[in-house]
């Protein structure tokens, strides 16, 4: 016969532990999930469906500026833009814009100082474009008979003439290529990237002002509705 002393003691039943075991591991809180995401680093490529579209524009602008700094600023194909003093400064600005835009896509915060600094290469390349045909390299190429264009209007006309498939079009295309080679293709990409950054900034400011105006009108309408009640 077995006595009461031989019966093993059963563990106490905990309803809370049983429910947690059936539900699986507890979900992390929002701060914990955010911290884990930040510790994991940014995905590649940077993507966030909730990020402002302006951050992607700034990122593309920075990449375009960086590409321009890696390309020649003149007819010497081995003389990339970043090898010059001004080109090195522009490269740092482009890297800063890429860095802060990449982070902003993930965190929602951007350092606007790099956007403001992008105005420096924009202004510098704008002045270079306005005086392009007085550049020594461009004048030397025109004197050598490599191209005949003397204004930007003639350059765009020559680009249009290069579109058809004909011998004259191929000759026009060679002239256009020689012109941009002597002017420096990197300057064009740097200007376009800086221009895109400034346009995105202006568009963001206008969009923010419009949103604030809409919110103000909504508050005024809500206040008028409460007063009528």
Image (tube, rainbow, N blue to C red):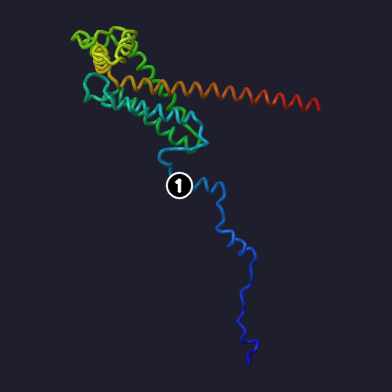
Q: Which residue is mark 1?
A: 39
Across the whole image, how many numbered discs are drawn on residues? Answer: 1
Of all residues, the one furthest to the right in this rendering is: 229
Q: Which secondary structure, mark 1?
A: helix
Q: Residues within 10 Å of mark 1 (few under 14, many from 20)?
A: few
Look at 33% across and 9% down and name the residue there: 157
Q: Residue 52: where, in percent of width, then height? A: 51, 31
Of all residues, the one furthest to the bottom in this rendering is: 1
Q: Residue 221: where, in percent of width, then height? A: 72, 24
Q: Quadrant of the C terminus?
A: top right
Q: Residue 53: where, in percent of width, then height? A: 49, 30
Left or right of 198? Residue 84 is: left
Q: Quadrant of residue 4?
A: bottom right
Left or right of 66? Residue 106 is: right
Look at 63% across and 24% down and name the residue there: 214
Q: Quadrant of the N terminus?
A: bottom right
Look at 42% across and 27% down and name the residue there: 114
Q: Quadrant of residue 153?
A: top left
Query: Is residue 70 in view from this perspective?
Result: yes
Q: Residue 76: where, in percent of width, then height? A: 21, 21
Of all residues, the one furthest to the left in this rendering is: 144
């Amino acid at each position: 016969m077995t006595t009461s002393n031989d019966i093993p003691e059963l563990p106490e039943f905990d309803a809370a532990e049983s429910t947690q075991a059936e539900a699986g591991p507890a979900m992390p809180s929002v701060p914990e999930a955010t911290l884990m995401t930040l510790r994991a680093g940014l995905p590649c490529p940077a993507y966030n469906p909730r990020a402002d579209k302006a951050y992607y524009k700034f990122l593309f602008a920075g990449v375009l500026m960086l590409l321009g700094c890696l390309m020649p600023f003149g007819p010497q194909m081995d003389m990339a833009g970043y090898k010059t003093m001004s080109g090195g400064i522009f490269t740092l600005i482009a890297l800063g814009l890429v860095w802060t835009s990449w982070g902003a896509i993930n965190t929602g915060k951007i350092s606007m100082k790099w956007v403001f600094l992008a105005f420096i290469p924009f202004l510098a390349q704008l002045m270079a474009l306005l005086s392009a045909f007085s550049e020594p390299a461009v004048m030397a190429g025109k004197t050598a008979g490599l191209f005949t264009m003397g204004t930007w209007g003639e350059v765009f006309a020559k680009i249009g003439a290069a579109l058809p498939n004909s011998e004259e079009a191929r000759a026009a295309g060679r002239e256009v290529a020689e012109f941009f080679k002597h002017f420096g293709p990197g300057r064009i990409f740097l200007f376009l990237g800086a221009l895109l950054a400034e346009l995105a900034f202006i568009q963001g400011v206008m969009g923010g002002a419009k949103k604030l105006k809409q919110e103000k009108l909504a508050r005024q309408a809500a206040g008028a509705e409460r007063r009528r009640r």
